[in-house]
Amino acid sequence: MKYERMQADRNSRSTPPPTQVGGAPTFSVVAPVYNEEALVEEFCRRTALVLESLGEPFEIVLINDGSRDRSPLIMRSLHDRDARIKVINFSRNFGHQLAITAGADYASGQAVVVIDSDLQDPPEVIPDLVAKWREGYQVVYAVREQREGETWFKTFTAAFFYRLIARITNVNLPVDAGDFRLMDRKVVKALNSIREQHRFMRGLSVWVGFQSTGVPYKRHARTAGSTNYPLRKMLKFALDGITSFSYLPLQLATYLGFLAALLCLLFILVVFILRLGAASAQAAAFYGQAATLASVLFIGAVQMISLGIIGEYVGRIYDEVKGRPLYIVAEALGFEHKGEERES
């Protein structure tokens, strides 16, 4: 396997790998970290091994997204041992997408690779992404051909989400491609100019354009720790993706309003016609409070759904108007510039 060959090459060296020298690196690997004390050191070891095999300068940018375990201590130790490993400590948990944003803000490589630190996305795929980048592609996304260790519910909902968002949004989002991707410096600069609060980074990386392609890979099962994406976060993530790139929910509210008005009109016509034959048994079914109550409840439900949809969009407008920074950096290790310079 590729990983074992790289390990053998590294073990055969008589001297340790050199630390990063001055100048911008060719490759930056951006990895959010949230309660990954069992995996972050192994992630850095494997990632460094892969990047060393490419023979060009690199940096690994770890973003501590408010971890509550020993992850920050381990990350600081990794930085102390290897200057190529750089650390951004958030003041609190700001979320996965904003951690990616901070990593892109701070990364200085000509090619920036975004990857999760839980090792479900294997770092050994990075050379395949780099190969496509050298061919001239500016966005190279990793496409999940297999998803080990995931429940049928997670697999089904993920497949449904990708296909739904591909249909209802105005971006051609690659199916079964997550945040694991390589982006050219031009793409990163374009992304860094977008400062919206509710971020859907995999959608934004497609929206900015540029030439792109995919590389298939096998997503591994998690070997330690627990998932940081429970159902609640998955639903919020899906909602951010849909509302960031589609007006369909607002249009659905309009359609529901027209449907409710049409049904009410038909109901009135039916009652009027039946009342003309007042003695009929069918007309008696529309007398009393039951029919009236059902009609009122139906119209009220449509109104509440519509208000809820509108409220989601208004809430996002409110967040943008407040103009708060996307994230706050408590500490940045290994960077020449100060953290607050990149928080806008």
Image (cartoon, helix red, strand yellow):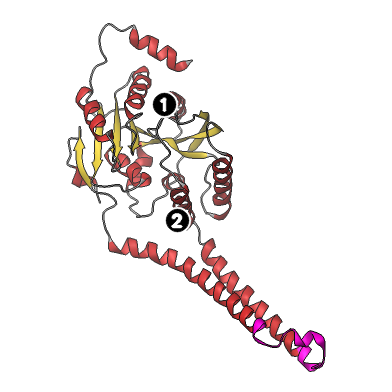
Please name whichever residue, 318 or 280, is drawn nearer the observer in this view of the structure: 280
Does residue 309 appear to the left or right of 9 in the view shown? right
Q: What element carries label 1?
A: helix
Please name whichever residue, 209 or 124, is drawn nearer the observer in this view of the structure: 124
Q: Which residue is drawn at 49% across and 55% down?
A: 242
* Quadrant in the rendering for residue 47: top left
The residue carrying pointer 2 sits among few (fewer than 14), some (14 to 19) or many (20 or more) residues within 10 Å by Cα, namely some
Question: In the rendered image of this protein, does residue 322 appear above or below residue 22?
Answer: below
CB of mark 2 within 8 Å of CB of mark 1?
no
Q: Which numbered marker is on residue 170?
A: none
Specify whether residue 108 is in view.
no
Residue 287 in the image, given as x and y percentages of width and height? 71, 88
Residue carrying label 1: 123
Q: What element carries label 2?
A: helix
How many numbered callouts? 2
Does residue 56 appear to the left or right of 136 in the view shown? left
Residue 2 in the image, given as x and y percentages of width and height? 46, 16
Magenta residue check for 286:
yes
Magenta residue check for 34:
no
Residue 12 in the image, given as x and y percentages of width and height? 34, 6
Amino acid residing under circle 1: Pro
Q: Distance between the residues labelled 2 and 1?
A: 29 Å
Please name whichever residue, 318 or 171, is drawn nearer the observer in this view of the structure: 318
Specify whether residue 153 is in view.
yes
Residue carrying label 2: 244
Question: In the rendered image of this protein, does residue 100 appear above or below residue 254?
Answer: above
